[in-house]
Amino acid sequence: MDAMLNRMISGNQEEPLWRRVLPDAPGVVGFESLPLASVIVTAYNYERFIDPCLQSVAGQTYSKFECIVIDDASSDGTGERIRHTLGALDDERFRYIRNPTNLGQLGAQSTALRHCRGAFIVFLDADDTLAPAFLERHIFAQVSGRYPTGLSVSDQLTIDQDGAVHSGTRLNRDALAEVKTAKTLAIAAGQGASPLNVVFLPWRDAATHASYGWYWQTQSALVFRRSVLDLIMPLPEDCGSFRICADAYLARFAHLLANSLILLEPLGCYRQHAANNFSGPSFMSIDQQGGDMRVHPPHSAFIDLVRMTIRKRQKMFDARVGDYRIAQIMAAIGDQSDETLTPARKSWRLSLSRQ
């Protein structure tokens, strides 16, 4: 598995990083032109897996990052293991914080986001790992692509608790084929780097609105623009319905605001094992690597949290999004309440329902 990941390194490493990431930016010279990325590692009772996870962050070819490791009140040796690993790394880009009480996945992420400064944010589960080129390829895709996106997502390998590879892809290509307006693109890279093959997924396509449609891989494969997260990330006290499967909220909401970009390269490993609260150890086939839907938050929980977040950040949404887009979002997710609708939005919703 390590050898496979080590091959996922972008292009000519003799080229400066800024030239590999910004090959077509006129007048751009130097490392200072690169945006800062923040990697938030959420850990709860994953003592066994945290070391390879943190080592994979330290090994990124995109070196302009910070890493916040948040221990969500683990009851095993996770905290001690984190401190030992960070001590061995001796890298000032890494910081450790511990929640006094367990908040669950989304609550821990909301807490850690307050400590971040990056323009791009990754939420990495402590049992998963990133390929060396993960940050570099994602940020290259987001700043060099021809279509606006609020998040990007890459393919993944699936590994078991011992690191053995069970599949070389997790992409559900049949699901992507249902999005008739999706666009397959090749983003030209810099000298010595291969083009990046991607699929642009527009939020307007109704196939992406269905509660059963999932195109975004797992949380550890996602990179968000911070400006999108500042709108959609709930307060920690509002995150209780997404103690697991936080990506089901974040990916869908970010996509509805600003589209998605699917990177067809595998750029990390998703670990499927018995201690995972959702997926468990079961492998059926490449496109059946889901989890126990009985514990997955229902679509109604997503609708409720979207509605609450818009209501609590009313002024921010009004300034950055506007009435018409909010009405479009609520119509797309099937919300029928009037709770988030101003008179103008009610008028927009009525007109949208007639289209």
Image (tube, helix red, strand yellow):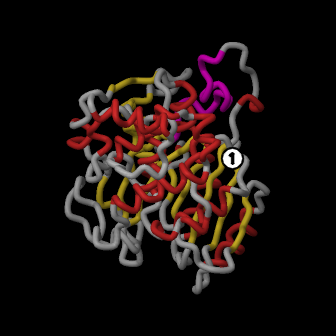
Q: Is residue 344 left or right of residue 40?
A: left
Residue drawn at point x = 74 percent, y = 62 percent: 95
Q: Nearer the viewer, residue 162 or 50?
A: 50
Task: Say which residue label 1 marks.
Answer: 65
Q: For the C terminus, give its image quadrant.
A: top left
- Residue 322 can be seen, yes or no: yes
Residue span colored magenta: 9-25
Q: Nearer the viewer, residue 184 or 225?
A: 225
Based on the displayed image, in which of its 4 quarters is residue 47 positioned? bottom right
Q: Nearer the viewer, residue 212 or 93?
A: 212
Which amino acid type is marked by label 1?
Phe
118 in magenta: no
Circle 1 SS class: strand
Q: Tell which residue pokes out farthest to the top in this image.
A: 26
Residue 133 drawn at (x, y percent): 54, 42
Residue 336 drawn at (x, y percent): 35, 50
Residue drawn at point x = 53 percent, y = 72 percent: 104
Residue drawn at point x = 72 percent, y = 19 percent: 28
| 24 versus 31 height, above or below | above
Residue 278 drawn at (x, y percent): 36, 70
